[in-house]
Image (cartoon, coloured by chain):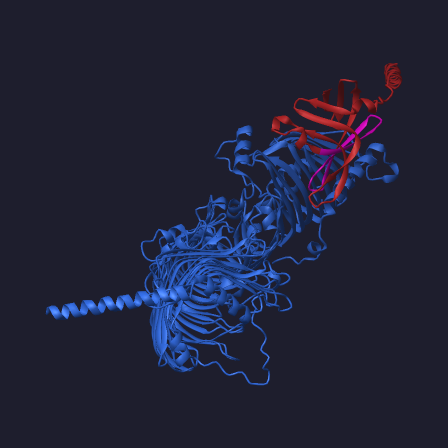
Chain colours: A blue, B red
Amino acid sequence: MPKWLKATLISLGGLLGLVVIVLAVVCWLVFTPSKLTGIVNKVAKEVVTCDVNFERVSLSLFKTFPYAGLDVHNVALVNPVEGAPSDTVAHIDDLILAINAKQFVSHGDIVVKQLLLEGTRANIYVSDAGVANYDILPPDDDTTSESKPFKLPDYIDIEKVKISHLNACFNDYQHGLFAEVNDFGATVKGGWQDAKANLDAEIKSKELSFVTADSMQNEKMTVSLSSLKLNAGGKMKDTSSANGKLKLNVTDIVLHTCDTAGAEVLSTSFDKLNVTASASGWLNDMKGSLKVKLPKGEVSVGGVDYVTDALKAKQSDLVSIEAPFRLNLDEKKVSLTDAEVSLCEWALTLNGDVTMPAEERPTEMDLTFATNRWDVGELLKVLPAKFTKWKKGMDLDADLQLLDGKVIGQLGDSLMPKVDARVELRNGKFYYPKAVPYHINNIAGDVVADLDLSKGGVSNVKIEQFDADVDKNHISAKGRLTDLMGRQDLDADVKARLNISDLEPLLDSVPVDVQGNANIAVHVRALLKNLTDLDLTKIKADGSVVVDKLDVVYDTIHATSPRLVVDLKIPAARRTAKVGEVMSAKITSQVLNVEMPNQKIDASLSDVGIDVGLSNVLQKGTPLAVAFDVESAAIKASMDTINLNTNSLAIGGSIKYDSTKQNILKKLNPDLNIELRNARLKLPGSNEPLVMPVFRFDYRPEICQVKELDIHFGMSDYHLDGSVSGLEDWLSHEAMLKGTLNFNSNYTDLDQLLDLISGIGVEKDTLERQRQEDHVAKEANPFIVPKDVDFRLNTRINHTSAFGNELSSVAGGITIKDGTMICDQIGFVCKAAKMQLTAVYKSPRVNHLFLGFDFHLLDIQIAELIDMIPYIDTIVPMLASFDGNADFHLAAETYLNAYYKPKMSTLLGAAAITGKDLVVLDSKTFDQIAKLLMFKKSTVNKIDTLDVEITVFDRQAEVYPFVITMDKYRVCASGRHNLDNAYDYHIELLKSPLPTRLAVDINGVMPKLNFKLGKVKYADLYKPEKQNAVEQRTMALKNMIRQSLERNVKEETRNAKRFD
Amino acid sequence: MKRFKFLVVIGFAALLTVSCVKPKFTPDQELLYGTWVSGDTHYRFDRSYRLYELFDSSEVRVNGAYWNPADDVSEEEAQAILWSLDEADLTIVKQMYMGGKVPNTYTVTALTNTTMTLKDNYNTTKTYTKI
């Protein structure tokens, strides 16, 4: 630079500086603070109606350099209003203002070079009547001219506005609005030119508080704001058309709301909140993005911390939002494109439109959403404890692989948009023993939800696939849950592989122990509540269950099967009032084993087909009741020592289980129709099986109706029908088993039959004890009449063998009653006579058996009588001497020992024989008697009548005096003999051609009898008018004996025709 | 003379016979009540009657029992009797369960607190001891 230029410039600069200094000194001297303060105060009092005081106003050159400004110190506006907390409306400690006054005056432009407010205090008050203390401007007297609409200046340039330490309160009692700001600071910079605007603002406040609603009844909100930076820029074409950008950075906001009692309602603290919003475009199509980043923060609502410790511990930002959007302010519509909202690692991506509410139009949404992979377990951990109380004691976790869907519809007070969502859940696990006593793992589900949450809307869920491992079991399902928020109607196909024993916890009210593996494929339709309640009455289901290695113990019933196929149906295919079936099943199995150890019952059924209907056994208090039709190709069964095999079994009926009862029939209450074919029954003590070609019976409680029972036993055949009752009480030894059966047989081996039924109902221990006490050897095996039974058999037997005798056409009743067997008035005919037999056999002890007969033979040939009952010849020895027909009555009884040997001291017998026109056979004995009684040789050996009464007692048979009239002779005979054949008889001639009466005494032991003449003693026995007391008594006894015997003869027996 | 002597002797003997006939023995029935045993045979004569059920469920009155332990029969298993005493004539009717009756008549020839002697129609006597 040349020297002259340098010198020139220095000179000019010095001159300029001198001019500036001179101007400044001039201004300082002209506009002294005191003068300026006076001017300002004067002008101010003209402008405002209240007291206003500027303590000091000075011209500022350096503070506002290079512009001149005003530096105001201590400004006070005082406007007393009744009710206001203070007379001072505002007080400003320091105010520096520098504006371009020339530009404002010449062009109307607003150019604020600097506006600094320091230490401001303001009290804004509006009374109930609407009197405001800030109303300090004089009223406008010009009421005629119309007010001009506000017109934005063409140019606004705010270079620096800074407010520091502003404290203000705002009390609007008229509108119920109250606010307070403490230590508020703000920095604003902006401009407006050619419809373009820009704004940079920063706000800080120690505390902002708002009290909303009238009469201070509602909430109070306080905000502490450390920094809020706002950067906005844009261009406005007109009021409805603009574009611009907005950036907002907020750090450390603390917000509290509390109710009037001071209790905290909401408390938030956002640490380093960063909100950046930018938008560009016209108001009807603005493109922008919103970015929010909140690394840390706290939210407390009603004392509940929503940002939990677990959430704070997360490394990622607490909340982040990155939302590109398009905004149509005309339509109030926001369109999101891949907007992502995240709470730590849980992100939600949104796409679509949201139209904000306008007049008579609610919010409208058309959004799609999708989550990232959510760790449900982690999510539950970060939720406030208040919202996870339900999870106490529950182990719940899952991977929410995907949650996506659509939200379409209107959102308003009574409107909710429709939500279509799809959920993919993997690796879930659930354990909550209070509700479900199982560990559920590997839960995987694909669910599509169609949610309509509006009033009256129906939400549905489609389970496309659901899989879970329940302990060692696997369950899968597909289906649909209709009306999710209401009825929850499930329609699903469920498949499961179950270890059945794992079901036991669900069946705790049912005394059942089940083992086995089940493959289940069931279609279920029911309300979810009914399913969880296992209310079988309200569930529809059908499907199949294949059970392998089934092992069930229900109370005392034990059933096993290697494989069981169950076709299940709920509700039951048929329902009866008796059972109340709620489910039915068709069960097929190759082999089904049933045992009841307590009853010593063991049964094995093959090729089983069972149609079964089951009562609502899952309902507490409802007993197990089963209706069934059972068909089995074959059955092997045993009960105690009884074995049964049958080729075919058909059982129809029902059982109703009553666990309070002891014996099996009372427990089961069976109502059965049973048919067995070709059954073989093996009874203890018999090598010969009972073959039953057919056995049909109906069993109802208390009575068993035997419809048809054919039995082949050895050579015997039996056909029975009738009824048996009291089986239940009999089994529990409470009452006798009663029955009335018709017993028909072509041939019956009675001995074999008696062996078969011997001892039924008598405890083996009892018999054994009796044997020991009575010293009875084992080889003695007498028939023990069944005890505790009361059976009546109406017999009709064509041929029978009994005790060595062959009988034909036997008919009568046999009663077996509690240890007593009565062959009751059995009538039968043989060639010998019309017969009637009543026989009684009792077995009170093994060694004390009772045998009694009441035996009547009418019109019997004496020889056949003796042939039939040889023992009669011993009792009535002279009977063999007669020929012809007689009536024979015999009652005899004795106790027997275990070998059927009579106990002679107990032997009693009474017999009566009546004969007419008998022929006395030639015999040595008769000859001897005839010789002694001097019978003529020409005497016809025929007797008119014979009436003999005989008794047996004490080993002696006593023949009461009887009379024989033979030709011209009338003989009376009596006597007794021991059963060892020692005789003592007396025969007396009552009438004869002889002039004298003779008597013969016969003594001795057979065959050596002594015959000698004896004394006559029966002269008047048959002359009632001459009888003495002894003779009267003798005849009375004879009569008593005969009557006691004849009273038992049935009329039918008397009238029966002889069999020839 | 011989015939006369013979007639005198006969007549005297007849007189002696007539004059020596003992008055008939009338036992005291009170002494009869109780249980009597002869050998193993036991009789029990009861004061009162009881009903005894027959096989056909009809009932008859009885008032005693008999049994023989030698045949393994106890008193509880005894058979029923209906007895009556008419002066010295004791009638014992064994009541059969089957309905028949087996009577026996005896003459009581002696009866004390401890012993009783019965004679049957065949002049067989048997002495019982009271237990």
Establish if A540 lies above or below A765: below
- Rendered residue at 87%/36% (across/down): A1026
As rendered, which of A1025 and A215 lies closer to the eye?
A215
As rendered, which of A765 and A90 lies closer to the eye?
A90
- Coordinates of residue B44 in the picture (x, y in percent): 73, 27
- Coordinates of residue A408 in the picture (x, y in percent): 43, 76
Establish if B23 lies above or below A529: above
Instruction: Evaluate whether residue A243 shows in this view.
Output: yes
- Coordinates of residue A35 in the picture (x, y in percent): 46, 64
Q: In the image as oriented, which residue stretches furthest toward the bottom?
A: A145
Point out the image quarter for the C terminus of chain B: top right
Picture quarter containing residue A799?
A: bottom right
Horizontal side of A597 relative to A1059 (left or right) equals: left
- Coordinates of residue B46 in the picture (x, y in percent): 77, 29
Where are the magenta residues, as a range?
B80-102
Q: Is residue A224 magenta?
A: no
As rendered, which of B99 and A442 lies closer to the eye?
A442
- Rendered residue at 29%/68% (across/down): A19
Report how many numbered discs are placed on residues in the image: 0
